[in-house]
Image (cartoon, grey):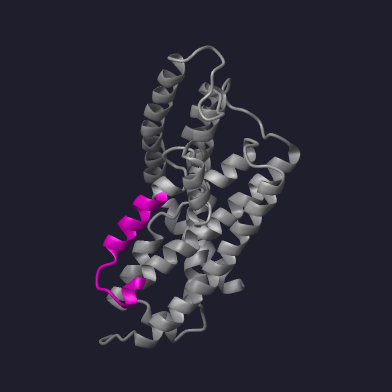
Amino acid sequence: MGKYLQVFRIGIQNTLVYRVNFLFRAAIALVPLTGTLYLWKSIYAGKAAGADVAGYALSQMISYYLLTTLVDAFTAVAEDDWQIAADIKDGHISQFLIRPINYLGYRFSLYLSGRSIYTVVALVPVSLFVFFLREHLVLPASPLAGAAFVLSVLMAGLLQFLIACTMALLAFWVLDVSTFIFIQFAFEYIASGHLFPIDILPRWAAQLLMLTPYPYLLYFPVGVYLGRIEGPDLWRGLTIQTAWVIGGFFLLRWVWSRGIKRYSAVGG
């Protein structure tokens, strides 16, 4: 564990070099969020007082998008998938194959260091944003919902990393993985609930999406926090999310073992 802690420390030092970049990135990310919130405010303004959309009151809808922004800051991969693909393509991964360090463990340590710094830096603009909208922000539906939310966010981070790594490892087979990454990101953006809450879709579509890993990246943790997912649905969702994390881990290991067998690099 000592060597991975050292990688974590080095990752933090390297990431701190770009802290201003992270600050501006976090601030710019609030621009589309602002537009989305104004859009929903306009939708609710055209309805009768106290009306809801798919069971969401205005305060819940605003809280939903604020929370998805926070969860995304905590869990989203930055450039990890691109860096992994570049390491494979350029042959830099060879140095890890001849040293007593696990490459995937090395990347996970860097992922944690990057998320730690980005989260701290992003708290500045996001906290100001939340402060100005504090009258619309709702508290966790219950203490159990708050605890389940934290657990679900942690598993969402693991799942984000596993999906990103697995996609990046396609570089063992194809020269350019950018198309696959962009397609995956586009589908994730919709299916994770980033664009809109999954449960405003027709019931059959929402249930179908809940069988995929993507809703458990954003929609599920936020739904738990808001009390939209509780009782048997909560435990069922946590079980499915855990199953996806475990399955994603073994899939990543399998893809890695298959890819490393066909990997070759020349030169020094």
Q: Nearer the viewer, residue 199 or 205?
A: 205
Point 26% across, 87% down: residue? 266
Q: Position of residue 168 (x, y in %)?
A: 37, 67
Task: Quarter of the image for the N terminus: give it.
Answer: bottom right
From the top left corner, tell me how far across and down residue 192 is, in percent.
46, 48
Judge whether 263 appears above or below 64 on screen: below
On the image, the x and y values in percent for residue 118 come to 47, 47
Q: Is residue 118 visible?
A: yes
Q: Is residue 110 visible?
A: no
Quarter placement of the C terminus: bottom left
Residue 123 location in percent, x, y?
A: 52, 38
From the viewer's perspective, tell me whether residue 164 is left or right of residue 245. Answer: left
Q: Quadrant of residue 43?
A: top left
- Judged left or right of residue 195, residue 63 is right
Q: Is residue 227 above or below residue 3?
A: above
215 drawn magenta: no
Q: For the point 33% across and 60% down, which residue is it?
A: 181
Q: Going by the picture, which residue comes out furthest to the right?
A: 143
| Residue span colored magenta | 170-188
Give the farthest residue toward the front. Answer: 204
Name which quarter of the figure residue 225 lies in: top right
